[in-house]
Image (cartoon, coloured by chain):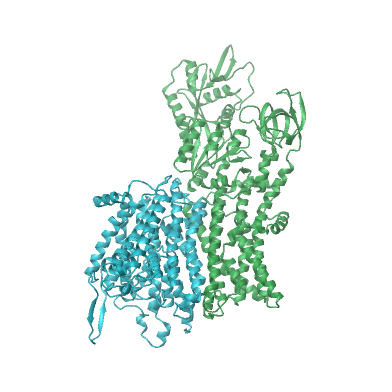
Amino acid sequence: MTWNGWAQIALVLALAVAMAIPLGRYTAAVAHGRLGFLAPVETLIYRAAGIDPKRGMGWRSYTLAMLAANAAGFALLYALLRLQGGLPLNPQGFDGLSPWLAFNTTASFISNTNWQAYSGEAALSYLSQMAGLAVQNFLSAATGIALAFAVCRAFASGGVSQLGNFWADLVRICLYLLLPLSLVFGLAFVALGVPQTLSPYVEARTLEGATQLIPLGPAAFQIAIKHLGTNGGGFFGVNSLHPFEGPDAIATALQIIAQQVIPFSLAITFGHLVGDRRQGRALLAVMLGYVVVATGLIYAAEAGGNPLHLALGIDPTQGNMEGKDLRFGLPLVALFSATTTGASCGAVNAMFDSFTPLGGLIPLFLIQLGEVLPGGVGSGLYGMLVFALLAVFVAGLMVGRTPEYLGKKVQAREIKLAMLAVLVLPATILGFASLSVALPAAIASIPAQGPHGLTEMLYAFSSAAGNNGSAFGGLAADTPWLDTTLGIAMLLGRFAYVVPVMGIAGALALKPKLAASTGTFPTHGPLFAGLLAGVILILGGLQFMPALALGPLAEHFVLAAGRSF
Amino acid sequence: MLDITQTPRQGTARRDRRAGAALGEPAILRRAALAAWAKLDPRQLVRNPVIFVTEVVAMLVTLLAARAAWLGEAWGFQAGIAAWLWLTVLFATFAEAVAEGRGRAQADSLRRTRSEATAKLLLRGDDRTLWQPRNATELRPGDLVLVEAGDLIPSDGEVAQGIASVNEAAITGESAPVIRESGGDRSAVTGGTLVVSDWIVVRITAAPGATFLDRMIALVEGASRQKTPNEIALDILLAGMTIIFLIAVATLVGFASWNGEAPAIPVLAALLVTLIPTTIGGLLSAIGIAGMDRLVRFNVLATSGRAVEAAGDVDVLLLDKTGTITLGNRQAAAFLPAPGVAERELAEAAVLASLADETPEGRSILAFARDSYGITPRALPAGAKVVPFTAQTRLSGLDLPQGTQLCSFRKGAVDALLKGAGAEAPAGFRDAVDHIARSGGTPLAVAKDGRLLGAIELKDIVKTGMRARFDALRRMGIRTVMVTGDNRLTAAAIAAEAGVDDFIAEATPEDKLSYIRRAQAEGRLVAMAGDGTNDAPALAQADVGLAMQTGTQAAREAGNMVDLDSDPTKLIEVVEIGKQLLITRGALTTFSIANDVAKYFAILPAIFVASYPELQALNVMRLASPESAILSAVIFNALIIVALVPLALRGVRYAPIGAAALLRRNLLIYGVGGILAPFLGIKLIDLLLQLFGIA
């Protein structure tokens, strides 16, 4: 590790936070529906779709509207992917996807996971990319943010049953937040050399006289939303490692900022919406703290290098550079790896499969902690609030009052729903991964021996259920078993989680907002931030320790002892 | 720091003497040890998900050990784990049994005092010569019974006629008799108490089996115990965590198969039981029972655990001024002479005017004159004519023959005296009177032969230590509100002197009710104490209503707690007991969850020692062998329950230092301590196991 490296990390994170603070205030205005500079477009959409933006929805109708929108999106995308062979904008003449792969891909993009069991440039038409995936990139991100708005509103006032209008939220988030930001970031990526074209792939002749097909496409704007919406699905198969997706260090830094800025800013938005900005800052501090620590751990592990390589006399100052690109450098790779997994983005600019065991453990563990650090757009915030409720419940009793968070009593109903939500990740990840390292049909997908193979499978289901979408690599994921189970894991990770969370929002909204006193558990400041960080680690992470002990931890100690498989 | 936890212990001591139910008394422990076995019944245990899972796992491991023994395989290790898993369950049921046992001992002593007497049922209205014996258990609400000196009052009721002194020691533990009379605020009588003198006619108000004593027995016995809202929520959290760890451990079978390994079931069982929150799961109900019990020992009966929890949440405390904040009687504090009058002349006239005054105020004037001026009151002079106080004149005093003349000495309300004297008050006197009123006192004017001599300042004396207690309450985040019938000026002065946050002056019952409603609308929880019938609506509206045992039946029905000592100040301690209950739950939950970290370090390297001996690097405690590591973790997990039983029953100490400081302290002790303690404990047990060569 070098000071220069840490300076790069600090600079990029500082920029992200600096942008997130004003953006958070702006997003609060979006949530309040106070912005009007696109009012004509907004009104036109409302009129065309028959939406009354002032009609409030209770938690049930809000959730049902969200589920209906996503079900419709699911049907459309699935049809598009299956039928792309006969549809326009398909210069390479790709066939429709297999039912398994189409299900997997649809589930993936609906749930903001963007797990890719295919390689974009070798399987998808431009129409599928633009009208299918890019549209879902917007819709799944806007869905997440809308849900977060609804949850924030539940804390903001007392004794109400309505949490806002889902359709109006969706329209406003797209119009005022995601589209303008994507435009800015997309243009920046074009300026940095990322292609944005509808022309067919270029055939080039190499110096040795061979022909090479160079894939192109409308990549720049899709990459902008891929990061901004913490989607993570690459235009090209190797994602941000591809020279057209991540041309240089500046572009990779910009991508990190794009991943972090909305999740960070939503913590600030939360503070604004509940009328106490310190509350938002406390959540942001926890998110940022975890990102810094995780980056440091990855950086240290990778800078330390692979002991087996070092034993062969390889220059130890380089660290472990396998699977990484020199144009990014170790610090930005470490930071990108921590942010993409912490933020439920899933884009990658290096191959985790080639990380040292501990370097690979951190991204995996960040996902398993519940994708709240800072988590996906919207989903990170409401996930964080679930942990905040649990933290307040367990430790809040220790001040001698029925626990309350932001003046809302935390009682049996909230705890029941919070535990239901918290159960989704371990049940899905551990259940499917455990089956998949035992069933012969699934084992065939794992090329690696020993603990590394287990890590690959564990990572795949963690990534799917956590709606992250990054791949550890190595796994042959496009099989009927994995396409199906991973697809189910993605849907469960998104929808089985958010329905109880919305139930909590509905219950909390109805409760009166109690006044705070000096006897109230303070939920801002370092003490609460530390407590929340601890609760995330213990309630979110402990259950994965046995599996991790057999995967990356075992690999680490085995490697240190010089044993390989 | 003021230790306001001191006061409850006085109450505790009294009841302890009566019930003889101190913690750790051998008889209770013996009985609890037996009861613990009965509680192993799975049908009963299923109410406690964590311990139920532990029991199921213990059964499974027992069967496996038996099978191994049957097949002639090594079974010692499995039997060891099985034994300690059973002990874990037993320790948990034992904790509950001890907590219940303490209540049961009290219930027994109450039951002995329950009335078996025959009642004298009046046959014709209030004609008390015509009665018929009737079994007390057959009395219906509305029946009129005669109770004479030496009779036990057969059931709860209101005095319809007569006045009697009643010994209520059976309920309150206080043997000095109290007066019960018809009408007013002292009309409620309780079944099982003894009429010591005179007679009363009682109108029965309680149905058989639903008397105060019956309810009290059920309460302390825990028979009607229902889980409180917070307990239910905590139970759900613990059940959820149990399911999560069940998943983590069950899926380990699949993960281990990747290396072609199959971990032994007893080992997985050990991992599961040490990870699920058995510590808090085992102690949760004991904490709740002990909390109610603490209140009972403190001579306060709560109608439900819910009320005790609500007490911990209270933000606003409504306290009556008289008797709670002040000593209750106004007392003379100064003599302020009118211009041109000597202080001593005023004092002597005041003494003469008060000689026949038997009210506490009058006596306090004599006492003050004696203490400050050395005027010793003498007997009523011969020939003196007492002029008693009347509502019309609002004056009292006496006429004294001096030589041929008759001198009149009067004291009374300032305006009344001035009107009687027909004189204009001198400016200096007016100022003095205003000053007294502003500083919270009551001025009394004194005149001799119609000549204004000056004023006596009567003051409400604030009880010592009240200011410090209110400061402590403020640090707890609780606002205190003084309720008084005084005018605003007087009320403001006393409020300032006592250090309360707010006051309601010239309070009517409606004022109290609307104040409570307003505070509740702002999202605050309100507690109040009251005794009179007109307090009943406010008591019912308050989140915590503490009724006085000496109060009316209506007040006792409206409140959700009854103070047997009839001391409204106790509201403060009731709040603390509520807080202590919640803190104890939170602290032990935190401790229990934090324990898991160390258990991983003990068990995980041990489970996978065959396929990954390198994982021994995680064995930071350097435990001797895999078997010893697993057994040590299970033993620690069981013993910690027993070790924490005293804490669960006694409760975590509460200090009014503000939420942030309290949280920091408890997080440090139970959070950080909870992470570290098992590292030490497990290592110690491992060393002992080595020493005795067990594993």
Query: Could you tell me which residue is drawn at 68 percent across and 41 percent down?
Result: B214
| Closer-to-camera residue (B24/A78) | A78
Measured as percent of width and height from the top left, residue B293 is found at 63, 49
Query: Could you tell me which residue is drawn at 34 percent across and 68 percent down?
Result: A233
Using the rendered image of the protein, determine whether residue B335 is visible from the camera's viewpoint: yes
| Closer-to-camera residue (A121/B537) | A121
Q: Is residue A304 above or below residue B578?
A: below
Which residue is most to the front?
A: A86
Using the rendered image of the protein, determine whether residue B14 is visible from the camera's viewpoint: no
How many numbered badges does the structure rendering display? 0
**Residue A114: quadrant of the picture:** bottom left
B656 vs A135, left or right, is right
Q: Is residue B485 above or below residue A350?
A: above
B301 vs A233, left or right, is right
Which residue is most to the top?
A: B404
Measured as percent of width and height from the top left, residue B116 is found at 76, 38
Give the colour in which the image draws chain B: green
**Residue B387: quadrant of the picture:** top right
B476 vs A472, left or right, is right
Measured as percent of width and height from the top left, residue A177 is found at 29, 57
Q: Quadrant of the C terminus of chain B?
A: bottom right
Q: Is residue A160 above or below residue B354?
A: below
Which chain is assigned cyan?
Answer: A
Measured as percent of width and height from the top left, residue B534 is found at 55, 31
| Closer-to-camera residue (B244/A94) | A94
| Closer-to-camera residue (B78/B192) | B78
**Residue B180: quadrant of the picture:** top right
